[in-house]
Image (cartoon, rainbow, N blue to C red):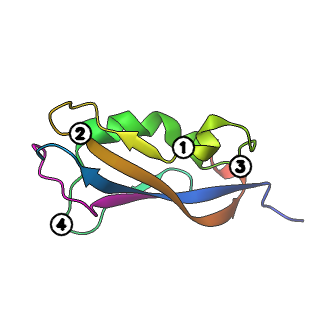
Amino acid sequence: MDETDMEIYDLRVTVERIEGRSVCGMNVGDHFDLTNSAHLKLPDGKHFCVYALASVLPFLAAKQRDLAAGDWLAQDTQFACPDPEERLIMQVSRTCRRRMNSADLT
């Protein structure tokens, strides 16, 4: 019996550019990974601004799944931090496809 009933993507959220001043101490290239559906991982010794995280977080569950080709979220990969002075832009990338059992998650 195959115990995997769904496939989702692991994601990486990377600071692509900062068009203003970095008041939160982040730099271009800083990132976090979202793996195994809900595991948020940061590189050792690094941080990620909670406000930048809050702005991208609502989209991550959808970005983990296959979306219709015409869906705007399938095409958009950049998200902005809400701080107008900082203008931090993040890139969401799929890193790998993972087979999982939804019963393990609910």
Q: Position of residue 16 (x, y in %)?
A: 33, 56
Residue type at mark 2? Arg
> Which callout, 1 or 3, points at the residue further toward the start of the chain?
3
Q: Nearer the viewer, residue 28 or 11?
A: 28
Q: Residue at x 21, y 55 (%)?
A: 47
Q: CA distance from mark 2 to mark 4?
A: 24 Å
- Disc 4 or disc 1, which is closer to the eye? 1
Main SS, magenta region, reads: loop
- Quarter where residue 87 is shown: top left
Q: Position of residue 2 (x, y in %)?
A: 85, 65
Q: Which residue is mark 2?
A: 87
> Which callout, 3 or 2, points at the residue further toward the start of the chain?
3
Q: Which residue is mark 4?
A: 45
Q: Which residue is mark 1?
A: 76
| Left-right relation of 106 to 24 | right
Q: CA distance from mark 3 to mark 2?
A: 29 Å
Identify the magenta region: 23-34
- Disc 4 or disc 3, which is closer to the eye? 3
